[in-house]
Amino acid sequence: MADTLLVAGAQTHNRVGDLDGNARQIREAMAWAEEQGADVLVLPEMCLSGYPIGDLAFRRQFVEDARAALERLARDSGQVATLVGTPDRVDPQRSWDTRERQVAIGQAVLWGGELRGVYHKCLLPTYDVFDEARTFAAGRRPDALWRIGHATIGICICEDLWAGDGPPEAQAAAGAQVLVVPNGSPFYRAKPELRRRLVASVARRTGLPIVYVNCIGGQDDLVFDGGSFALDAGGEELFAAAQFRPDRFLVEVPLAAPVPAVGKDTARSPITVHTRRDPRPAARTTPSAAPSHPCAQVWEAICMGLGDFVEANGFAGAALGLSGGVDSTVCLLAAADALGPGRVLAVAMPAGEHQADEREDARQLAHQAGVELLVHDLDELLDLAGEHLGPVDPEAGHVRVELEARARSMVLASLAAERGLLPLATVNKTELAIGASSVFGEPTGAFAPLRDCPKGLVYELLDWHHELHGLIPARVREREASLRQRSGADLPPFDILDPIVERYLNGEEELAELVAAGYEPEVVRGVLQLVDDAEFKRRLAPLGVKLTARAFGQDLRMPVSSRWRPYQSEEQALIADTAGDELLEAGQALAG
Amino acid sequence: MADTLLVAGAQTHNRVGDLDGNARQIREAMAWAEEQGADVLVLPEMCLSGYPIGDLAFRRQFVEDARAALERLARDSGQVATLVGTPDRVDPQRSWDTRERQVAIGQAVLWGGELRGVYHKCLLPTYDVFDEARTFAAGRRPDALWRIGHATIGICICEDLWAGDGPPEAQAAAGAQVLVVPNGSPFYRAKPELRRRLVASVARRTGLPIVYVNCIGGQDDLVFDGGSFALDAGGEELFAAAQFRPDRFLVEVPLAAPVPAVGKDTARSPITVHTRRDPRPAARTTPSAAPSHPCAQVWEAICMGLGDFVEANGFAGAALGLSGGVDSTVCLLAAADALGPGRVLAVAMPAGEHQADEREDARQLAHQAGVELLVHDLDELLDLAGEHLGPVDPEAGHVRVELEARARSMVLASLAAERGLLPLATVNKTELAIGASSVFGEPTGAFAPLRDCPKGLVYELLDWHHELHGLIPARVREREASLRQRSGADLPPFDILDPIVERYLNGEEELAELVAAGYEPEVVRGVLQLVDDAEFKRRLAPLGVKLTARAFGQDLRMPVSSRWRPYQSEEQALIADTAGDELLEAGQALAG
């Protein structure tokens, strides 16, 4: 039977900048791993500083403070080799541009009261939500090895793993018997499965077992979902941790056969850490967590993202407008779940027709969720505010609708400010995609839990939640989405609209591919143009939780002022031009 | 006397995505350069696509459309070698991460009806406002040369120039006699002088004359100021173009001595373009433009940024709230200048005390600027909206002040929507820096012309404008900045506050350096902490024009949810903790 390594892992809660709190979590994990008699403790990427730190990487004091915290941890290290993720100052480096970088993403090896060395991440993701080439210097020792007691291990940090000819392959060639992979890997719907598949392929390609350790926690628009795991050299699961929960685990990893030459070649000579091996602890791998329902994963991501944003920014809780529509209903339930119902304030602001139904649904929902509800009749305020508008052109009826949305956001923001609550925007991804929202209306709030949740997924979440808890009045599900009423466009249903949007955003498919995939050319053309046109409105929306492979925001950085409109038919272009002229004339007429 | 090259340059107006409009500008410049008998026409970086294109680089259709437009331009090319900036598809490349890039920043050489070749930018700036490593593949021929008629030229694109051991040095070593440098170089206050100094040092180091061609135009938060110039091999000015204006020019550049070996070494063999040399045109260099006043440069940047944002996003003009304070006064005058007074709507929304003065100043200002003014008395609306708030804690008096700011932004946004106008936020950089603004109040608008304008600079602009045009009532200048009343902090005066903020943002100076520079430790500590605390509010502010070396936004990407507070004294930390507890209690008390 193969020799084994007892690897401990800890999914720490990612909190950017909280050096003391993060060090406390690490120290607790270290004490636990010592008790367990583990050979090595693997902690997530940048777990000491939190991740991603953005331009904090350029604050000298921050990097120094992290170093001081690391040295205190090193002094406390015992017989378990502990791998701590941290920013690490390195010699100034220049590569893809003329600016020097002086900080690398490091994984420090602590043992026996000392800092024994630091591995530096070699590949720096600079795509989607990642900006690492902006801030960091790249590691230059992809083949670095570490002798931990009887085993030779390789450390690869996140992106290092995926190149196919990168650090894992170099470390395998140099004689690694196991790879440990600290990560700060943010969640999106397909991500857990994707990670598993990619890591399995690396295990099989290198012939090495892999322990993959991810953090948890919400950080602005990202949520880290944990879900750490270990695979054997054949890519089969040895262990799987829970998602969205702090978790500690032990895995007994069967090592690949040792390579006799390791240590002879000076350039590749591993740093040696003699871990305590006697008495050898009874090997035991922590039982795996059960995989959770896809909707539960999305739900937990929303709750964790919202909850951590509230805590990190010092709010007492959250406030939201409750219309009795599906979006505000899902936001209400998620906020109650994330913060506890006692820290959520719902505000119903009915006006005009259908008030009675909406008011009743809001009451029922808030009551069932255990959330305080304030009801503010807005008719009088809206009438008065409406008097400040001129005699509105009947064709500009949207102006009044938008005024309502703005008045609601004004009242909500003020009530929230009064109580120290974070005002939530209930806008969803489909609305942001096609621009079906009022500027400074629905998207106005300081956090938008559903920002990256397509409307179809909002319904899925609603149904999934209702099936579990049964809190949702039937009328909410049935009520026509206000989206359709509000948008002038002749929109396809969500089960056609959402996939077109997602496939377009994912970047591989444009008009030709989507038509080839079976969608109506005029429908595709119309949707893509709405998406391109709505960038201006999207830029005014607040942060929200990334849930899909390509979220608006950091993930997809489109110029606001772009004139490229390839999907406009000639007829539409003509209308747009004329409309532009009319707007211009209207503008010129202003001075009268 | 040295041989010369007659170089034509054109500062085209940068419009991202407007392939037809950009091609039209290029074609006009080509026709003009042919008429002038120039040897070579240099156009700005990415002038065909506009710059920066962000993730449009990943839209296959966009890159194909740009290529088709380039080929049409090539067919129209004549005897002048024309260098056109364009995105260019290249073989997939991987470098700093695992993602392949397939598009490079190219400068195409067109001549005699054909596309003769493309130089690819080698250094990809990925700092400050730039994200090029995210989207582009790096060029791999830093020493590429081009034989244009009798001269051997090197092309360096923007960042390529600054490394000290990059393309200019490689091209000089390979035998270049002159460097041409297409740019998309955005403006900030110190930039024009910085460019000149850096280019002069490259000219002297390489012993080559340099023609530097920049575009103009506002693109979201960036403004390109033109200001193209040519220097001889000693770094002395041959020519300087105007800033902030489309401009065409001719420069007769004295060439460095030819290197006999060029063309022998196959690897370095330049592409040859035989330009028409007979009859040799009478050489004439366009007269230089006079340098403009530093305040005039900032003013033109604000006007160009605002004007182009309005045009690109299809607005008829702009609307703003006019309080009679310095910020709204400067915004009013800039908007009137940028768009013409007939396309600006000013809305005075007086309430409470001091109404009469404010109303009178607003009237006088709007009248003198020729701008339509609407006056909406907000007292009644504010009283009614106030009724929706609970019995406000006297210590939370800010809630009412913030409600006023929100009510103003609601009315303004609705009036703007009614007329198709862009609603402006009048917030300035100092307010954003220290968080002295209401969430969804003053910073609410879809564009903030003064977003990167420190308060001290707002006063400078006001005085400079008043000296030139005399439009500003004395009371505006004298009126106490509302900032001081609103912020609870004991703030230092702007001439101390602003430099501390700027030096902190610039990244080289933190607490120790600022104290060493002579600022009071407690003042520095207080200001830095306000800056760190205000990230949450800043994220809710709209786009605005970059004016300083380090603007909030793309330039400075700080996590919102960062817990790092190194400048907090122990006493403050205690207060913050307690305040947090109180907020928590308040939140928990909500459900009652």
Image (tube, coloured by chain):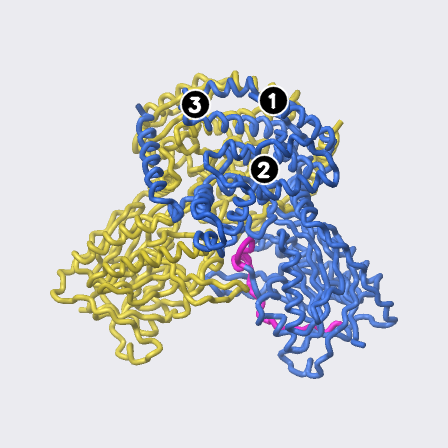
Chain colours: A blue, B yellow
Q: Tag 1's secondary structure?
A: helix
Predominant SS along the magenta part? loop
Q: Amino acid at mark 1?
A: Gln
Q: Which residue is mark 3?
A: B348
Q: Are marks 3 and 1 in contact (CB under 8 Å)?
A: no
Within 10 Å of disc 3 (Cα), the crowding (few <14, some 14-19, many 20+) is: many
Left or right of residue A506: residue A277: right
Within 10 Å of disc 1 (Cα), the crowding (few <14, some 14-19, many 20+) is: some
Q: Tag 3's secondary structure?
A: strand
Q: Nearer the viewer, residue A294 or B512?
A: A294
Within 10 Å of disc 2 (Cα), the crowding (few <14, some 14-19, many 20+) is: many
**Chain containing the residue with disc 1:** A
Q: Amino acid at mark 3?
A: Ala
Q: Nearer the viewer, residue B546 or A363?
A: A363
Q: Quadrant of the N terminus of chain A?
A: bottom right
The image quarter containing residue B452 is top left
Residue at x 86% of width, y 72% of height: A278
Residue at x 16% of width, y 67% of height: B277
**Chain containing the residue with disc 3:** B
Q: Is residue A538 visible?
A: no
Q: Which residue is mark 1?
A: A355
Q: Is residue A94 visible?
A: yes
Q: Tag 2's secondary structure?
A: loop
Left or right of residue B568: residue B492: left
- Identify the magenta region: A126-148
Residue B317 lies, in percent from the top left, at 36, 33
Residue A592 lies, in percent from the top left, at 30, 23
The image quarter containing residue B276 is bottom left
Are tags 1 and 2 found on a single chain? yes
